[in-house]
Structures are given as structure tokens and as C-alpha cells.
């Protein structure tokens, strides 16, 4: 979860978030290079007042200012397409979590062989009052979604009323919940922990009262939780 005064990203909980952070660093590097080059060129021109009226054309210069931007765009496009593919393509999931957005709470379902498990379909509401020690105001919920560590998990997201967006920052996941449509993504937690998120689609007067809390625990603890 983000903290007051934090300048960087949250610690990545999976490979997707790690790739997104690396892509951000690459983008910022290219932005810095381009901005610095333009600034130096403008300052050089302002100070020296040089003009190239005696050089009406230059094939080398034209080639350079064509190849350089194209190279930069390719450096951004290739990893971007890779990230999009990884986020959308779910290969051999070991568990499925279905998320349903409502005004203004979330429902979670753990289907097994296409059928819902009676005790594993529940609603998750924000805790408005009576927080316990260690709980976060406007972020904690009465029931957390519990998932195992080091397992490929398919997450299906939809909505029962209006547009919602299931967002988990530490996992680099943001999936729109659209009525009548099911979108999917994948999760693969690398470490145990509690991860927080929020609905990221304006969905009504209590839009800000739809926190998301996912607790990643070891597989043995998850099996005990399922059997409880």
C-alpha cells in the first residue's frame, strides 16, 4: 500500500508489476534524453544565434531525425505489447477467482468445476467504523479475498449494475467490470502479504467506498482456509 511521502511505486508482488516498473523506468529514461537534447539545442541556439542558411539540405540529418524517433518508439512499443500480452493471456490457471462489482461493494466467488462453493461466495464491504488496531481507514474490509502464493490465478471480473474497475496496485492489475461482459487477467503472487486497491471507475456517490483487499498466503494455509 502507498504511504505518505512515498515517491516510488509499491513493492512489486508479481512479475507483471516488475515488468511495468521496468517499462516506466525505460519511458522516463527516453523522456529525459529527449528533453535534455531539446533543452541543450535551444540554449545553444539562443546563446550563439547560429543559423544554417548556407546548408539548405542534409541527407544525413534527415536520416538521423527519422531513424532516432523511430528507434525510440520501437523501444517503447515492443515491451508495451509484451506487457499487454502477459496481462491478458492466462495459461493453465490453477485457481479461478470471480469478482463482481456492485454499488458499492465487491462480491467474490471461488468456483470449482463450474459450480460455486457455498461457503466461498461472499460480499466484501468497507469497514466504516470500529476499526481494529492495524487496520487502515477507508481501505480495510470486513472480508478479504484470500489467494495462495506461487500459483497462477485467473481473475474474472464483471459487474452487476454499472461500470466498475477492479484495481490492485501492488500486482499491477486494473480490470474493468462491465455489465453483461466478463474480462479476465492473471495473478501470480511471489510473496505473502496484504495488498490494497480501490475501484478505479467512477460508479456513483459512494465510489470511494469500494476498497479491495487481497491477502496472499502460503498454499498450506490457503488449503486450511478452504477447508475451514
Image (spheres, grey):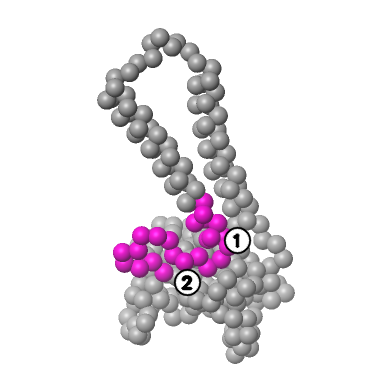
In this orientation, which residue lies closer to the viewer: 42 or 158?
42
Q: How many numbered circles are shown?
A: 2
- Residue 70 percent coordinates (x, y): 55, 33
Q: Is residue 82 left or right of residue 3?
A: right
Instruction: Pick the quarter of the image with the C terminus.
Output: bottom right
Q: Is 45 above or below relative to 203? A: above
Q: Is 222 above or below relative to 17? A: below
Q: Quadrant of residue 120?
A: bottom right
**Which residue does the image show at 56% across and 48% down from the upper left?**
80
Q: Neighbour class for label 2 at 10 Å: few (<14), some, many (≥20)? A: some
**Which residue does the image show at 52% across and 32% down from the upper left?**
68
Q: Which residue is mark 1?
A: 185
- Residue 209 percent coordinates (x, y): 38, 68
Q: Which residue is mark 2?
A: 195
Q: Secondary structure at mark 2?
A: strand
Instruction: Pick the quarter of the image with the N terminus.
Output: bottom left
In space, the residues marked 2 and 1 are separated at their CA atoms by: 17 Å
Q: Neighbour class for label 1 at 10 Å: few (<14), some, many (≥20)? A: some
- Residue 207 percent coordinates (x, y): 39, 63
Q: Is residue 79 left or right of residue 128?
A: right
Q: Quadrant of residue 196?
A: bottom left
Q: Which residues are magenta?
A: 1-24
In this orientation, which residue lies closer to the viewer: 138 or 45?
45
Residue farthest along the left direction in this orientation: 47
- Residue 44 percent coordinates (x, y): 32, 27
Whether residue 100 is in magenta: the answer is no
Amino acid at each position: 500500500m502507498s504511504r505518505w511521502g512515498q515517491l516510488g511505486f509499491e513493492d512489486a508482488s508479481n512479475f507483471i508489476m516488475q515488468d511495468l516498473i521496468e517499462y516506466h523506468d525505460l519511458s522516463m529514461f527516453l523522456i529525459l534524453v529527449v528533453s535534455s537534447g531539446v533543452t541543450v539545442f535551444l540554449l545553444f541556439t539562443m546563446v550563439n544565434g547560429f543559423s544554417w542558411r548556407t546548408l539548405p539540405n542534409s541527407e544525413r540529418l534527415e536520416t538521423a531525425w527519422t531513424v532516432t524517433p523511430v528507434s525510440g518508439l520501437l523501444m517503447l512499443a515492443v515491451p508495451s505489447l509484451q506487457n499487454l500480452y502477459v496481462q491478458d493471456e492466462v495459461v493453465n490457471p490453477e485457481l479461478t477467482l470471480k469478482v463482481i462489482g456492485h454499488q458499492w461493494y465487491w462480491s467474490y466467488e471461488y468456483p470449482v468445476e463450474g459450480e460455486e462453493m457455498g461457503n466461498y461466495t461472499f460480499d466484501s464491504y468497507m469497514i466504516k467504523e470500529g476499526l481494529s488496531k492495524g487496520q487502515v481507514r477507508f481501505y480495510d474490509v470486513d472480508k478479504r479475498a484470500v489467494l495462495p502464493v506461487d500459483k497462477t490465478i485467473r481473475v474474472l471480473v464483471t459487474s452487476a449494475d454499472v461500470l466498475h474497475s477492479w484495481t490492485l496496485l501492488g500486482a499491477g492489475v486494473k480490470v474493468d467490470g462491465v455489465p453483461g461482459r466478463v474480462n479476465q487477467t492473471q495473478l501470480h503472487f511471489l510473496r505473502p502479504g496484504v495488498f490494497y486497491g480501490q475501484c478505479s471507475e467512477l460508479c456513483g456517490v459512494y465510489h470511494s467506498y469500494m476498497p479491495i483487499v487481497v491477502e496472499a498466503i502460503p498454499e498450506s494455509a490457503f488449503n486450511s482456509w478452504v477447508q475451514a
